[in-house]
Amino acid sequence: MKKSTATALTLVVATLATGLPVWVAVNESERQGLDAETARVLGYARDVLLRSDRTADQADSGITRLKQAQGADPCSDASLALMRQIDLSSSYLQAVGYVRDGRMLCSSLGRDIGDMILGDPDIITANGVGIHKELRFPFTPKQSFIALQRGDYAAIIHKDLPLDTTISDKDVSLAIYSLSESTPVASRGTIIPGWMARLGSGNQATFVDGRHVVAIVKSGRYRTASLAAIPVDKLNARTDALARRLVPVGVIAGIALALSLTMLARTQMALPAAIRAGLKRQEFFMVYQPIIDLQTGECVGAEALLRWMRPTGELVDPATFIPIAEKSTLILLITERVLELVARDTGRFLASHPGFHIAINLSAQDLHSPSLGGDLERLLARTGVPASSFVLEITERGLVDVDVARELTRVIRAAGYGIAIDDFGTGYSSLSYLEKLEVDMLKIDKSFIEAIATDAPTSEVVPHIIEMAKSLKLRMVAEGVETEAQAAYLRGRGVQFAQGWLFGRPAPFAEVAQRVDNPVTA
Ligand code: C2E
Ligand code: CA
Ligand code: CA
């Protein structure tokens, strides 16, 4: 990837990383805000319905009592006394009285309090209750009343009473409907005519309509419904308040995410440059891990492993920088340096220990690079030892094309170097494939050694790998041997060599040399 493309990509990702949590925060506050407002408006509608139901209950039971007690004179002293009693015990009713020809002749208020004209009801419900929606009486001209009439009796109700909830919010619209009518019996605030239709056949509806959040609830006992609505501005104000709390969290999360992404991208982008600088500044050095003859316990060789000490003092793992170097021709520069370092570290020792070998890791690219030949020649020239003192470790990834691989291995062998197939078992080599190559050794990958004597499915593969190597007459090096049990198992199966923490960790070459020259005898 080009650097400019990578920078642009990082920027896009960082912007997304900042934007996404904020977007989520805003959305979440909107959702929470709407949920809260819907719950509030539904609460108002239920409150109004409760009052309307209670009003109807009281009117109904009052009228029933009057009917049952009716004698020859519906306006007798006894009747009036009963009316007053009903009135006093009914919190929602202003008066109950006797009606004849659209006029209330007597009521709990008395006999002669002036004309109380009801006229014909505006609505007659399915169960025969007449509703007078708008009544005014001469003795309180400013007040308007509702009357519920059944037969010759009626209950008078203050028009505002069912709507006079504890809601202090003046922006809330409230209404009570008789289901047989599309206009409300009583209402307050803005009521849009189409709202009621949205109840349909349901018992309850909540919705956002244009500039309002609306709730409608149907009575379970009467053919009535209540409606409450609040302007969306209210909702927006609440959402804003919520967003003010949530968005900063989103911004902080976003910035943190973007920062870590940018830092990650920067280290990734800067690594090749840092490797180049590290090569110039001699920040790379080799460590060597002993390779042991499993029969004799003797150290017969060592694998050269690269280390990178950054100027910060940080020791970087090859597993981190080798794959990055392998993406470009940088790996060729690294291999060139590795061969220089190996020559410097081991040349003198190898000259005096002809049977000892140094194993060197090569990448797939090295094998196909024209520079490898020259680098290897320089290695021999610098050390003055034969090519047989070195084993080149090649992974199966470096040998994909069988014809190329055969030619390569032939040339390398002809020059006198040993060849080991590294990480054996993790690739795709088949027996027939390996037969075509000129190879000396197989290095059994440590994932298989780890699995020895465990329940891991790979544990069953180890004997097959060993048999495969034997049938090819190849010597084997077991990698990553950490326990005596693993060593015993491998020895028992005829594996000749091993490498691992059990025998020694990678160390400066002087330590390996010391060990060979002064073996500790048990
Ligand atoms: P590898 O070639 O498979 O090297 C063996 C790795 O196993 C080494 O890791 C070694 O330190 C580790 N090891 C050895 N014994 C044990 C053990 O008993 N237990 C465990 N858990 N690990 C053990 P290291 O040095 O970190 O190298 C990692 C990889 O980096 C190497 O894997 C190799 O693929 C690559 N590498 C190292 N040096 C070079 C180099 O000079 N050139 C190239 N091209 N690649 C290199
Ligand atoms: Ca290796
Ligand atoms: Ca390996």
Image (tube, rainbow, N blue to C red):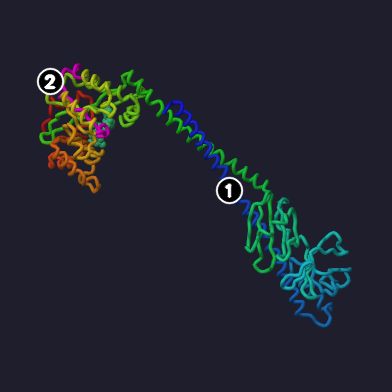
Is 385 magenta? The answer is: yes
Quadrant of image for the C terminus: top left
Q: In the depicted view, which residue is nearer to us: 369 or 445?
A: 369
Q: Which residues are magenta?
A: 379-401
Mark 2 = which residue?
Answer: 352
Tag 2: amino acid: Ser
Residue 87 in sight in this render: no
Q: Residues within 10 Å of mark 2 (few under 14, many from 20)?
A: few
**Sooner in the amino-acid sequence: mark 1 or mark 2:** 1
Mark 1 = which residue?
Answer: 31
Secondary-structure class at tag 2: helix
At which x and y percent is residue 28?
A: 56, 45
Residue 241 in sight in this render: yes
**Image quadrant assignment for residue 438:** top left
Number of numbered discs: 2
**Image quadrant assignment for residue 147:** bottom right
Query: Marks 1 and 2, how far apart in space?
Result: 80 Å
Which mark is drawn over residue 280? none
Is 183 magenta? The answer is: no
In the image, the residue with mark 1 has its CB under 8 Å from the nearest atom of ligand 1:
no
